[in-house]
Amino acid sequence: MNERFLDADLFIASFLGPLEAYKNQIGTLIFEFGHFHPGHWERGLQFVEALDGFFAQLPKGWNYSVELRNQNFLQAEYFRVLRRHGLAHTFNSWSRMPPVTEQLQLPDSFTADFATARFLLKPGRNYEQAVEKFSPYTEVKDPYLEGRMALIDLLTAPAKPGRPGRRFLYVNNRLEGCALWTIYAAITGLLQKKDQIASPDHLS
């Protein structure tokens, strides 16, 4: 056990303090939690309670996002805690997480006035497999169409109650083989949705 895990005082003093001078340049701060094994947390609710206590102590005015790697933690109480503190759930495409398309359908999964997503790995594929398959990351070698559709959905969905306006989206080389080409493919698909986009200026 790490005694400094979710230590709000340490985080404020050693991270937020030095970062304060660059605050206007920062979109969101993502708290990425690795996959917890059963021995780490007996119940997902215990982790959520720890999150609640931690974020209750942090200063406001920052866009905080939370990324989980345990599918069974995606429960109503988790989303309620995020909403209580204005935190965004990070929709993440990862080995042992459900596809982002499924996470987008979870009730009340948009929990802040902004949205965050990370497209890292195709579900079912681990990091080592992706490195072996895709290196040196110069081209798309395995198009992941469901992931692209989720990316396009996050780009095009109009802002409305329950669907935030600002979005922070990240794409990794290990999703399909080359992040730049994945982004290009998503933008191409976005431009083809003419019923939702008046002109290419929408991308500015």
Image (cartoon, rainbow, N blue to C red):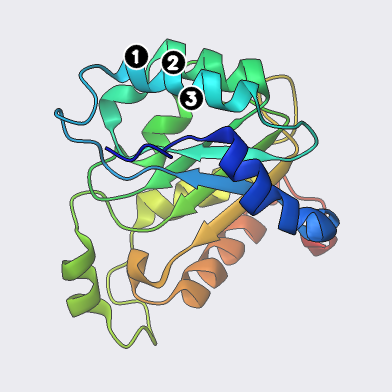
In this orientation, which residue lies closer to the viewer: 136 or 57? 57
| Callouts 3 and 2 close, C-beta under 8 Å | yes
Which of the numbered marks, if any, corresponds to residue 49? 2
**Picture quadrant where residue 74 is located:** top left
- Residue tagged 3: 51
Task: Please tell me whether residue 1 is drawn above or below residue 172 in the rendered image.
Answer: above
Q: Residue at x 55, y 47 (%)?
A: 30
Task: Please tell me whether residue 140 is drawn above or below residue 83 in the rendered image.
Answer: below
Amino acid type of the residue that numbered disc 1 sits on in the rendered structure: Leu
Which comes before the other along the chain, label 1 or label 3? Answer: 1
Local SS, label 1: helix
In this orientation, which residue lies closer to the viewer: 6 or 150? 6
- Residue tagged 1: 45
Residue 40 at least partly seen: yes
Local SS, label 2: helix
How far is disc 3 from disc 2 in space, using C-alphas? 5 Å
**Picture quadrant where residue 12 is located:** top right
Residue 108 at least partly seen: no
Residue 51 in percent (x, y) is at 48, 25
Q: Residue at x 70, y 51 (%)?
A: 194
Lateral position of residue 62 relative to residue 85, left or right = right
How far is disc 1 from disc 3 in space, using C-alphas? 10 Å
Amino acid type of the residue that numbered disc 2 sits on in the rendered structure: Glu
In this orientation, which residue lies closer to the viewer: 122 or 51? 51
| Callouts 2 and 1 close, C-beta under 8 Å | yes
